[in-house]
Image: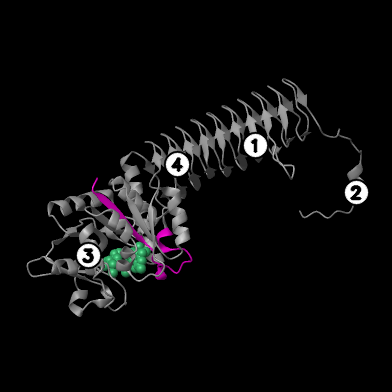
Amino acid sequence: MNNTCAIILAGGKGTRMKSKKPKVLSEILFKPMLGYVIEACNKANVNDICVVTGFKYELVEEYLSSVGDFSIARQLEQKGTGHAVMMAKDFLLKNKGKDVLVLCGDAPLITHECIENSYKSHIENKNAITVVTACLEDAGNYGRICRNDDDTIKKIVERKDCTEEEVLIKEINSGVYWFNVDNLLDCLDKLTTNNSQGEYYLTDTLEITINSNKKVSAFVCEDTDIILGANSRKDLFELNEKMRLKVIDKHFENGVEFISLDGVYISPDAKIGCDTVIYPNTIIKENVVIGEDCKIGPSTLIQDSVIDDRVSLNQVQCYKSKVHHDTDIGPFVHIRPNSEIDHHVHIGDFVEVKNSFVGAGTGISHLTYVGDSDVGKNVNFGCGVVTVNYDGVNKHRCTIKDGAFIGCNTNLIAPVTIGENGYTGAGSTITDDVPDEALGIARAKQQIKKDFSTKKLAGRRKKV
Ligand code: UD1
Ligand code: CA
């Protein structure tokens, strides 16, 4: 959409949210609401975006710089939605002759289809303003759309300024509009604060435009969810729930199986292959790709990771890592960032892997820490192995070559290398490299003290 640009209003404090954060940074499925609004614009090919920041602008601007390139208009005092758009005057002047989409940073369910279809209607009807509206059973605190007898739009009235009759109107203002830029610039000069909240209302531009005999119409949105905004924690919770079910629906369609939806939260960007089963209490955060025929959960959290086909993750937390096909992990396993677990690996209970490569066919079955290590193929870790990677100042790496057998309760004091098919005796603290095919054993030799306990435990009371 060549002749378009957008202004996203993100300056408000969101008093009703009772948060230290600006409202637009409140998250729905692990992403700030503002991020969803930006994404919808980008998907609709509206790429020239100005964001009006205000309350804690530094936080909003920091977020913006992490997701793209934007014009910023700061609104240092929040005097209403009309005032917010006035702050973007320079942006509008640069975009004269075009149409500008105005939307709220706190209404994250907006879709690119709605943006595209309302634009089409805006152009076809040659409107000066097109407002996106919806009809709600309970119009709540949304602005009401007042129409004339002939159904044309008369004005928008804010909830707080409604007469008793106007309160009953079911058609509401979504807060999304298309404006002809030149007309909007004219209107902004004419806004006043003559209303119950003493604010400059963007919504007053409709009446001003109509009074100057320009065309204003509504694009009525069938899907009433799209317009929902979050002004309170309860609203946020409800939006989160709607989005959660919408995302899960998409996966149902793609052939993903869910045993139950209890505690299942999946980021909208997740990709999951067919015949994968998701068990309860599974949280899949941003940037996750999961293959086919996997078993994920119960009680599993994955973020920023790639999980290949036929992987099982049972009670696992996995961050910034890659797990190759046919590997099974869990229960109670922590895969920390920068780990790569190759195919046909088995990782069992109470194991932590960090910043390490684990080669194909390797088994790390119980109670083991593998940190900063390069582990080869078909290695066997006994129970309770610890890579001692940190000397209090620096981190060092362990190298464990193919086929090695690490005895139970071995401490590998890094940097150290265990050669191919190398072996360590159980209970050893290995400080020096073990050559290929060799045994490294480092523990005190056993002594026997005969009849020791006869005297030592004499008189000991037994419970049963
Ligand atoms: C606004 C509309 C209302 C509509 C509703 C849809 C007005 C006067 N009212 O009401 O008709 O039904 O949105 O959600 O426009 N903001 C600023 N600076 C400000 C004030 C607000 O940037 O000075 C931003 C907020 O961060 C928010 C958006 O504008 O993203 C909407 O503000 P909000 O105060 O939530 O407006 P509503 O009362 O919901
Ligand atoms: Ca709002």
Question: Mark 4 and mark 1: span between their CA atoms?
Answer: 23 Å
Q: Quadrant of ligand 1?
A: bottom left
**Mark 4 touches mark 3? (CB < 8 Å):** no
Image coords of residue 277 (percent x, y) = 41, 40
Q: Earlier in the sequence, mark 4 or mark 1?
A: 4
Numbered circle sitting on residue 288: 4
Please state the extent of the stretch shown in magenta in the rendering.
Answer: 1-26
Q: Earlier in the sequence, mark 3 or mark 2?
A: 3
Name the residue that disc number 1 marks: 372
Name the residue that disc number 3 marks: 186
Q: Residue at x 16, y 52 (%)?
A: 123
Q: Is mark 3 within 8 Å of ligand 1?
A: no
Q: In the image, what residue type sits under mark 1?
A: Asp
Question: Mark 4 and mark 2: span between their CA atoms?
Answer: 59 Å
Q: Residue at x 61, y 40 (%)?
A: 354
In the image, which is nearer the foreground, mark 1 or mark 3? Answer: 3
Name the residue that disc number 2 marks: 456
Q: Earlier in the sequence, mark 4 or mark 2?
A: 4
